Amino acid sequence: MWVQEVDNMPEKGDQSYLRSRNTARILESLRQNEGFSRIDLAELTNLDKKTVLNIVNDLLAKGLIRVTSRQADGAGRPKEILGLNGSYGRYAGIDLGGTHLSGVIIDFAGECIASSDIEVHNGMEPDTLMKLCVYLMGNLLKESGLKEYDLSGIGISFPGFVTSSQGSVSSENFPKWQNIPIQKMLQDRYNIPICVDDSSRLMALAELWFGKGRNRRDFIVADLGFGIGCGIVIDRKIFRGSAGKSGEVGHTTVDVNGPLCTCGSHGCIESFAAGWALSRDAQIIIREHPDSLLRETGGNSPEGVNFRQVILAANLGDPYCAALLNNAGKYIGIGLSNTISFFNPSRLIIGGRLVQNNEILLKAITGTINSNCMKQILEDVEITVSELGDGASAWGAGISCIVNAENLFFATLQKKES
Ligand SMILES: [Zn+2]
């Protein structure tokens, strides 16, 4: 079990800050664990009982938490067991990827109410992709039985940089997506808060709240898919870098004479091992090896082949695709060894669409890390595969809306105190 510690004690007299921090601790405790009474919460958070009673009563009155059951407690009054109130808010999370558009609707407790997936490609015009986002939202609302007005926010997970405070985005892997004001476009359409962030960071947020990062203070999430990035969590906080561009491990160089990368450099990890690089090399396999199974799984069309078809052919025993994935895994392993040496994390969580049903790649990654990483650092890190599956970044995008909703609630507390 994990309780967020108060790492920056407020200045004397800053009651509103202290109240926000304590409220955050209680909400996090209830998110991570079920079945707590007020007394349990006081013991768990080390806050005094009066503070917990005040905060719990306020959260109950505002509807962020609810009484989930009552337990008989000897001769006294039954003990009220508390939990987050899912219906406090419903939030959509949409993950824009190089080959997919996937979405979820989650509630305030983080429960997934609906999910949907559409295949796309990275050469799409922004307007077309926006139409598909609206279409996906329609599917999600239909599945959940909710109406647009039931949603309190939409989170967008984007594989690139947020280039302005207004939520414009750019990506090396989406040639037509340069300085696209996605936040404004969705805000104009839905008129609710829109949160936009990098997909690897949102994947890390999902791991932090509901995945294998739940009870870890620091960890790294490797986001392997059409592109390659990583999310960094230090002291239970997402590390963003000075300008929100941290985690670009995919664009670190592993061979100065390597292939041209989408960023303009040569020999980045992505240029060998990202989903887009595997598609490029898969085209060569289809053209040069008539006996390759990829001709079957890839529909005999070099242009349209994608990394999922490569994984499928490799799993069916195709030696060319297996060699391609093995080679990619080695380069990813080198990059992750460097990252582990740099950060000394307690856990490395490997996730993303590229690792789904891809034992060959995973074996090459872990084998390379085990043989490349310094022994003394390697023994500190546990290497594990995410259990959140394909939808981790979409879920993280929904969670970013919950973070936003909590921050809005804390702002009302501060207003009340001032
Ligand atoms: Zn690059």
Image (cartoon, rainbow, N blue to C red):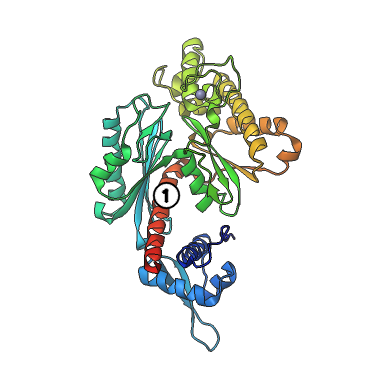
Q: Is residue 56 left or right of residue 249?
A: left
- Give the residue at x 75% y 36%: 375
- Give the residue at x 36% y 68%: 62
Q: Quadrant of residue 128?
A: top left
Assign a secondary structure to mark 1. helix
Tag 1 residue: 400
Residue furthest to the front in view is 12
Q: Is residue 94 left or right of residue 385?
A: left
Q: In x, y percent, where is residue 212?
A: 57, 49
Choose between 312 and 95: the one closer to the eye.
Answer: 95
- Give the residue at x 50% y 39%: 242
Choose between 224 and 199: the one closer to the eye.
Answer: 199
Ligand 1 lies under 8 Å from the Cβ of mark 1: no
> Where 254 falls versus 115 (above or below)?
above
Does residue 211 show up? no
- State the quadrant of the C terminus: bottom left
- State the quadrant of the N terminus: bottom right
Does residue 398 show up? yes
Q: Mark 1: give few (<14), some (14-19) or many (20+) Cα within 10 Å.
A: many
Look at label 1 and name its amino acid: Ser
Residue furthest to the top in view is 288
> Where 139 falls versus 107 (above or below)?
above
> Where 210 falls versus 134 (above or below)?
below
Choose between 392 and 169: the one closer to the eye.
Answer: 169
Choose between 42 and 391: the one closer to the eye.
Answer: 42
